[in-house]
Amino acid sequence: QVQLVESGGGSVQAGGSLTLSCAASGIPFSSLNLAWFRQAAGWKRERVATIDRDGGTRYAGSAEGRFTISRDNAENTLSLQMYSLQPEDTAVYYCAADLRRDMFFFPDQVSYWGQGTQVTVSS
């Protein structure tokens, strides 16, 4: 059974930083393509950043230059370092995984999701 468990969410003031982590189990981690999504209240789920199994990364425009996605295949962990956080970054952040490439353009078809971790940024 595949499990993705996020941690590291919390409350920060604007301009602050947070690092989210996602621990994966139940599947060979190195074979997974991974992503972070977020969903703010009343909004659709939004792709934030992706990292494929070869280490290639992509970022949404809102995350470019402020967020860094990384993976540690030895520790089976996905991370998202977030800097210069703003109130508009407030959302539930989800870890996602799929063995197939490019599935993160189709969130409804992504195979595995974590339960989410809340990030709240106050002004």
Image: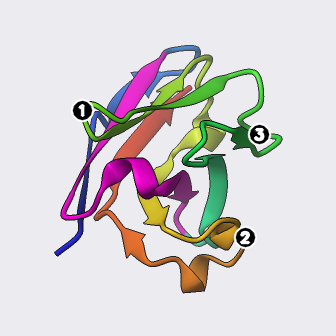
The answer to which of 104 and 38 lies nearer the viewer is: 104
Magenta stretch, main secondary structure, is: strand
Left or right of residue 60: residue 31:
left
Looking at the rendered structure, the kind of residue marked 1 is Glu
Question: What separation in Å lies between label 3 and label 2 (alpha carbons)?
Answer: 16 Å
**Comparing labels 3 and 2, the label whose residue is closer to the camera:** 2
Question: What separation in Å lies between label 1 and label 2 (alpha carbons)?
Answer: 26 Å
The answer to which of 58 and 121 lies nearer the viewer is: 58
For mark 3, what is the residue? 62
At which x and y percent is residue 27? 26, 63
Image: 8 above or below 88 = above
**Callout 1 secondary element:** loop
Residue 75 disc label:
1
Question: What separation in Å lies between label 3 and label 1 (alpha carbons)?
Answer: 28 Å
Q: Which quadrant of the figure has residue 123?
A: top right
Looking at the rendered structure, the kind of residue marked 3 is Ser
Q: Earlier in the sequence, mark 1 or mark 2?
A: 1
Looking at the rendered structure, the kind of residue marked 2 is Phe
**Comparing labels 3 and 1, the label whose residue is closer to the camera:** 1
At which x and y percent is residue 52? 60, 48
- Identify which residue is drawn at 65% across, 57% down: 47
- Identify which residue is drawn at 68% across, 78% down: 106
Q: Earlier in the sequence, mark 3 or mark 2?
A: 3
* Part of the protein shown in magenta: 17-41
Left or right of residue 68: residue 119:
left
At which x and y percent is residue 86? 62, 29
Queried whether the magenta region covers residue 48, the answer comes back as: no
Q: Earlier in the sequence, mark 3 or mark 1?
A: 3
For mark 2, what is the residue? 105
Image: 59 above or below 111 = above
**Callout 3 secondary element:** loop
**Callout 2 secondary element:** helix
